[in-house]
């Protein structure tokens, strides 16, 4: 529920706090995901089985990823490393991922 409120804040308003939270999520993505996944709105994934983060909503509801991140992701692409994060880090990462989703 907290994540939904954070995503709503980010989606509905572009306050300095929301921007800071998204930037924090971007830094988390760069540190933990960029080795394999495209982490920006226009880059390419380095791993052929790692989808760009901007396309995750095509396969998963972004808010549904909160539980997967909270439990530690053990699966994704076959050689994906385990990812563990605090609730705040998860919220920031998901806010960032939500902010870069490909728009039709």
Image (spheres, rainbow, N blue to C red):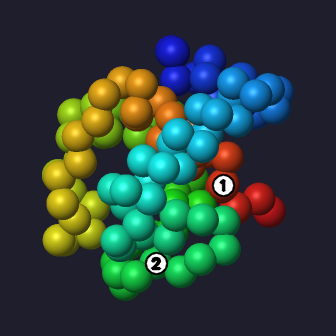
The residue shown at (33%, 56%) is 32
- Front one among 3 and 61: 3
Q: Is residue 67 above or below residue 4?
A: below
Question: Where residue 94 appears, x then y in whole percent?
Answer: 51, 40
* Residue 100 image label: 1
Q: CA distance from mark 1 to mark 2?
A: 14 Å
Q: Is residue 8 visible?
A: no
Question: Where residue 36 appears, x then y in whole percent?
Answer: 35, 73
* Residue carrying label 2: 45
Label located before the other in sequence (1 or 2): 2
Would you call the spot at circle 2 few (<14 residues within 10 Å), some (14-19), or many (20 or more)? some
Where disc 2 sits, the SS reads loop
Left or right for 90, reference 62: left
The residue shown at (41%, 66%) is 34
Q: Quadrant of the C terminus?
A: bottom right
Left or right for 20, reference 25: right
Q: Quadrant of residue 84?
A: top left
Left or right for 92, reference 20: left
Q: Quadrant of residue 11?
A: top right
Where disc 1 sits, the SS reads loop
Q: Is residue 49 above or below residue 67?
A: below
Left or right for 80, reference 40: left
Would you call the spot at circle 1 few (<14 residues within 10 Å), some (14-19), or many (20 or more)? some
Q: Is residue 60 above or below residue 103?
A: above
Question: Where residue 70 appears, x then y in whole percent?
Answer: 28, 31
Q: Is residue 22 visible?
A: yes
The residue shown at (40%, 34%) is 90
Q: Is residue 33 above or below residue 3?
A: below
- Front one among 56 and 16: 16
Question: Where residue 67 appears, x then y in whole percent?
Answer: 33, 31
């Amino acid at each position: 529920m907290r994540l939904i409120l954070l995503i709503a804040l980010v989606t509905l308003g572009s306050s300095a706090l929301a921007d800071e939270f998204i930037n924090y999520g971007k830094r988390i993505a760069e540190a933990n995901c960029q080795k394999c996944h495209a982490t920006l709105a226009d880059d390419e994934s380095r791993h052929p089985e790692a989808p760009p983060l901007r396309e995750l909503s095509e396969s998963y509801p972004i808010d549904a990823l909160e539980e997967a991140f909270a439990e530690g992701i053990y699966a994704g692409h076959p050689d994906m490393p385990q990812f563990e994060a605090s609730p705040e880090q998860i919220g920031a990462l998901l806010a960032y991922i939500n902010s870069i989703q490909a728009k039709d």
